[in-house]
Image (cartoon, rainbow, N blue to C red):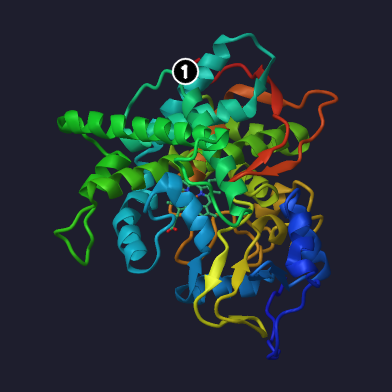
Amino acid sequence: MNTLTTPTRQSGLPPGPPAHWWGLNHLQTMKPDYLGFVAGLQRSYPDIAHIQVLNERITHVFHPDWVRDILVDQSANLIRWERATEVFSTSMGQSVLVTEGAQWQRQRRMLQPGFTPKRVAGYAALMVLAAQNALDALTAQSPGQSVDMDALMTEMTLDVILKALFGAHQMTNARPVSEAIQTLSHFAISEMLKPFSWPLWMPLPTVRKVRHAQRTLDHIIQQYIQGQQAKAHEIGQDLLTMLRQARDPEQPDQGLSARELHDQTMVMFQAGHETTATALTWWSGLIARHPDVAKHIYAEVDSVLQGQALTPSALQQLPWLQASLKEAMRLYPPAAVLFTRRACKPISAGPWTVPQGHLIAFTPYVIQRDARWFQSPDAFQPERFLPGAPDIPRGTWLPFGTGPRVCIGQHFAMMEMGLIAAMLLQRFSLQWPVDAAWPKGDLAVTLRPTTPIRLLLQPRGAHCGA
Ligand code: HEM
């Protein structure tokens, strides 16, 4: 499909629905269902839409060429929406997720070597171990049980990120951690729709809950950092060691300060497991709902792995599995909305110019369901991503974002999800419970199912370690 357009310069602002009462009409519609609001906007204005909300002017860009042009080629003239970075820095400090300019460049340069495909392959054994522990525990329970997939995936991905960050570890109870992360996620998304935050010293119930969640995570991170310091002679190839040893190539005598080390560890911890757990939860539900697709993946997993332990290279031989993960993230991108950007200079969006000071929004959930680029856009059809299928137009599949601020953990995430998904299907067939309804998406920081995805897990017989 050809997505190229020849811009004929347009004057004035891009088209969009009228604002009544300074855009309170938009605010009212977007608050209960933000994604529904943006999808409606895109139906009326397929490529670009401008709206006013209170004192902000926001341009939603949907055309994939323009999205790429802005996020890749004009990224130097954008910063992240200040309100979002303010909210995220409450729990993630001055980490690579929220910093800008020279500070961000320095941090990204220092972290990048820990996330190259080669380095990431070094974490595979730890990932397999985490998945094996959780699946062994599941196998020991009664067959055909109904399993809350979000809880299972969160347990596995939490274990993976802890092992990758801190080396082998054993966390006895992961529940307080995942609850703390959920609290901070919900807080972050609700705060972003408000013009100001309550100071964190206010004795309000929500504020107290958020402070408690923050203290829980801070405490755990500090414990691990100090614990690793005490066992310095055992330090291996984990991410924390990489962060400690990271040097800025432009100032080789400078490492991360103690505060930066804490903040970067916190961001990896938070950004690095909720996203993958969410993607795997939706994926597992889709597999259970689509036995016609699942049969290809079971066959592939059985013939390639033949009951053997999984390695990163074996993943390359599982095209249906990889395609199903990509398709699940097309329909349910964990980061359904990218960070909104502020234009620091006028920004070209195809034939339009977004004036300096305006906000620009990108919504993968909507862009990835555009019928112009994806036939039957709401259908789960992993065939679209199989080798030999027609190319997916660039800029239409954005679960990891694009441009210089693309997700630093994308190779890590793809490998982790591939390993966990393959190991799960090696051992269990996933069945959708009769009469269970398919959930909608709930936009917290990640796109979570509104009601839990519970599946029946039937053991499939022989597997590695059985
Ligand atoms: C399925 C899993 C994941 C998804 C869908 C995802 C998605 C994203 C997206 C969309 C962005 C860019 C946001 C924007 O441009 O507005 C991002 C940034 C980021 N992600 Fe991920 N992510 C995933 C896994 C991970 C993992 C495993 C890690 C680390 C271990 C990680 C760490 C980060 C960091 C540090 C950033 C900020 C990068 C920067 O601004 O330079 N993510 N992620």
Q: Nearer the viewer, residue 219 or 4?
A: 219
Q: Is residue 168 above or below residue 191?
A: above
Residue 321 figure quarter: top right
Classify residue 308 as left or right of residue 259. right
How far from the left and from the top, in percent, is residue 342?
54, 70
Label 1: few (<14), some or many (≥20) within 10 Å? few
How far from the left and from the top, in percent, is residue 259?
28, 47
State the quadrant of the N terminus. Answer: bottom right
Residue 23 figure quarter: bottom right
Which residue is rendered at x = 63% and y = 59% of the image?
397
How far from the left and from the top, in percent, is residue 186?
59, 41
Q: Amino acid at mark 1?
A: Gly
Q: Nearer the viewer, residue 61 or 461?
A: 61
Q: Which residue is mark 1?
A: 465
Q: Nearer the viewer, residue 455 or 118?
A: 455
Give the residue at the far front of this rendering: 203
Classify residue 201 as left or right of residue 258. right
